Structures are given as C-alpha cells and as structure tokens.
Image (spheres, helix red, strand yellow):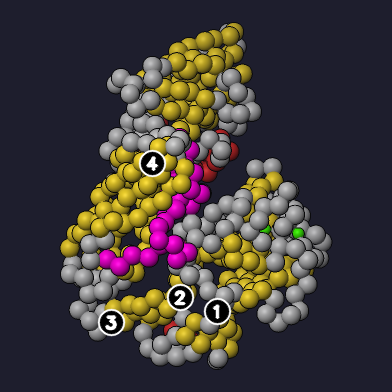
Amino acid sequence: MRPCPLTEEEGVKRIIACLAAGTAFTATTPALAGAVVDDTGTGDAVVTLMEQTTPAIFPGQDAWIAIPWTVSNAEAREFKVTSVSSDGIDVGYPENTATFSSLYNDDTLSPLEIDFTALRIRVDPQSPSPRVLDITVSYVSDTGAHTEVVTLPVAIDDSVFVGDGLAMDDGLLGEMSDNDVAWFSVGLLGLQDSSHVELRVTDAGPFDIVYPAERDHSRPNLGTYLKQGVEDEAAIRFATDDVDAGSYTVTIEATYYVGMTSVTTTVQRQITVIDDDSNSGSEVLYDSAADPGNWITNPDGDDTATTGQWDVSNPEETSWQGHITQLGYTPSGAPGVITTGAAGSETGQFDVDSGRTSAISPIISLPAGGDIQMDFAYYFAHLQNSSSDDYLRISIVGESGTTMVVQRTGKPTNKSAQWKTKTVDLSDFAGQDIQIHLAAADEAAPSLVEAALADILVTVSWQG
Ligand SMILES: [Ca+2]
Ligand SMILES: [Ca+2]
Ligand SMILES: [Ca+2]
C-alpha cells in the first residue's frame, strides 16, 4: 500500500485531499477505541497520538505524512510539534511554519476533535532498523504548559520499488483481455536526482508496444528529470492479438543519467491475460496519446477568444493561491489538447479570455458494427470570478448529427484542475466519419478559465 503520494512541491495543502482519497493513511489508522480516554470527564488534557505506525514509506522517498491527534478531558491550546528526532530519517516541516508543525485546522485541539500535524520525512535507505520518530509536542492546558515526547515507528515498504539510482515499481503491471489494448503506468521513484529518464520495453513477450507521442520510449509524466524522493509514472500501451490466457513477464528498462554517469535500471513486470470469448477482438481507431493527428483550432472561423486558444501541447502548470488552474501533465505524459499549454509569466496570461475558442479533431472513421467507445481524460478549471456564462463543451460531430458528451459550466468558486476520465458509447455513429469538437469560453465578466482533454482512445470491440 502506498503512502500519501505527496511530493515536496505539492506540500501540505493536499494532505487532507490525499487522506480523503483513501490512501494508505486511512488504511493504517487504528480504530478510535485505541485512544486513551479518561472517562471521568474531569482532569487535565490527555493528548493521544492516534497512529501506531506511519504509513508505509519507501526508503529514499520524500513523503508527507499526516499524524492524527486527539485530546480528552480538556482543550490543548497552542498545540504544535516542536521537534522530531530519529536516526537516519530527515524530517521537514511545512513551508509556512518552517521549524515546527501546527495542526491543520487551528492550534487548539478540543475534546473529541481529531486534527493532524504534517511532517515530511525521508528515510535513508542505509539507516538501521527499526526506524522510530521521537516526536516532541507542546501545548497549553488549564493547568499550564506541557511538553511530551511520543514515539512513532516508521513503517518501511521495501517490497514494491526496486532499483538503485531510480526505482521502478514491481509485480503485476495490469490485466487485459486476449484481444485488447490498454495503457499501463510504471511507477517511478527517484533515489538520486536523475535526468534524461527514458523507459523502454526490452522484452515485450507476446505484446505489441506503443509509446506516447510516437516516440521510441516513454517519459515520466512530469518530465524527463526525476528528483530524489519524487514519485512519477510513465505510460506504455500494450496490445494483445489472440494471446493465450496466462501470466506473462515483460522486461522494462529505464535509462537515465545521475550527474554525467549513464545508468540503467531493469525491472520485470507481469501482465495477466484473460481469455474473453474465443472470437472476440478489438481494434484501436484513434489514440491521441500515440498520435494526436491534426487538430484544427477555430474550424468555423468565428471564435472570439483573444487568448487561451486550444493547442496540442505538453502543458505547463499554472496556479493561483494554491488552486491549480492548469495541470502540468497529462495522465499518459503525451501531449494533450489544452486551452494554450504554455504557462506564461502569470496565471492569467494564457487562460481563455474574451469569448470562445473551439477546435476539431482529425476525422475518425468508425466501422459499421461492433461496440465502439471513446475513453478520454478532461478537466474544466476556473477561479471564483467565473459564472455560468463560462463553459467547456465536448461534442461528437457525425454525419447523422452532433451529440454533446460533456458540458461543464462555471460557478463563482475556485475549481482546481483535476483529470477525470470518461467513457462514452459511440455505437450510434457506427459506419460514419466522426470528429471530436471542443469549445471552451470565458463569456460575460472576465474569469480565469482553463480546460484540457487528453488520452483520447477510440476503440471498436466485438464478440464472436
Ligand atoms: Ca492555458
Ligand atoms: Ca479569462
Ligand atoms: Ca466569464
């Protein structure tokens, strides 16, 4: 089980979201019954650490962990973690406090409340076991100031990632049918600062391999430089053509530089192939991650937007006060279709301004039969200066008509960019030439509006 996958850059603000997503943290939180409670209802504050260990951490990984606290009997005010000591573990505190970690909500812990302190830890792979954090907390109760030291064992996960300078995750890569196509992600962890990171499948077994953007290799989503302690992923497409059911091993090689030294890490991963119906099959009709083809911006010549026009690009991240308005990656790492992928010099430089921008995909010819579906990832992001006049619309344009498959409208709230995936059934367009039409707009009052689409995969499958 992976711990909350937070990098240093993302910082503490995502911890609660990460917890809410049900990652390792929640899986290892003991039941509330474990807390020490003085049920007399009187007496001084009793502060309790609600964890018995940290989430499992990979040696070498820079991980943010959220430590849950509760108190019984009375309030603990001015609560903070003032120091953490441990052999072989680097400890960091959130940037806004720098030398300590306060609670997430405010600095008072009230009876029955659960709140969190955040710490960044990095376990030296060479440090001796067991690794334990000695955490000093200070707080003020009605009886005065208190300082306590509590110990928290660090759970180590050394089974998942393998490698030296750069580690790749191990074990099962994924599961697919015997006539199928699937993008699988290889997890990466920088054990040292690595540059020019490239992944190749050197033994593909019975699979046909495609890399994003028609390259001869796959790159990490966040770029070819993988910093020490940072986790990333690289996507590779696998296809089967009447492969017998069973478990297959593929060999994936990462090449990279540590300083001036060329290094190679190799990992063996397994793919499980399941026998579908004997005559079933599938075929890829369009795959934007492999080859986006020629998208045309402003196809009807009547767009009004003055900036943020759709382009096919590797997006750069933009944000405003912690709200990400444009994500700096696509799920596969291949170029996406973005309302201008360049970040510019400030958040509002290349968002959609002053009206609508539209774009249309290359023509995709659909066969007359079979189950035809389109999978894609997208988001619509805006800041609180948005309104219901702003929108993202994704439509399928066929010979028989136009169907809108996504419509999102703005609201006066800060909505951060987050990739969502969606699958739509295109069987109604069987036998037709179709195109995907995109429209995004900042109408009425000026608003920060961004939209993106990526990893569009149109496939036909059939049952014998
Ligand atoms: Ca933009
Ligand atoms: Ca705007
Ligand atoms: Ca607007």
Do we see residue 195 in this rendering? yes
- Spatial separation of the CA atoms under disc 3 and disc 4: 48 Å
The residue tagged 2 is 286
Q: Mark 4: few, some, or many residues within 10 Å (few <14, many ≥20)? A: few
Q: Residue at x 42, y 56 (%)?
A: 218
Q: Quadrant of residue 25?
A: top left
* Residue 115 place in picture, x, y as percent: 53, 30
Frontmost of labels 2 and 4 is: 4
Q: Residue at x 23, y 66 (%)?
A: 206
The residue tagged 4 is 262
Outermost residue to the right? 445
Amino acid carrying mark 3 in the image = Gln
Frontmost of labels 3 and 4 is: 4
Do we see residue 52 in this rendering? no
Q: The C terminus is located in which quarter?
A: bottom left
Badge 3 residue CB within 8 Å of ligand 1: no
Amino acid carrying mark 1 in the image = Pro
- Whether residue 77 is in magenta: the answer is no
The residue tagged 1 is 362
- Spatial separation of the CA atoms under disc 3 and disc 1: 28 Å
**Does residue 116 sit above or below 166 in this rendering?**
above
Viewer-nearest residue: 280 or 232: 232
Badge 2 residue CB within 8 Å of ligand 1: no
Q: Residue at x 53, y 74 (%)?
A: 293
Q: What stretch of residues is rendered in magenta?
A: 207-234
Q: Are marks 1 and 2 in contact (CB under 8 Å)?
A: yes
The residue tagged 3 is 463
- Spatial separation of the CA atoms under disc 1 and disc 2: 9 Å
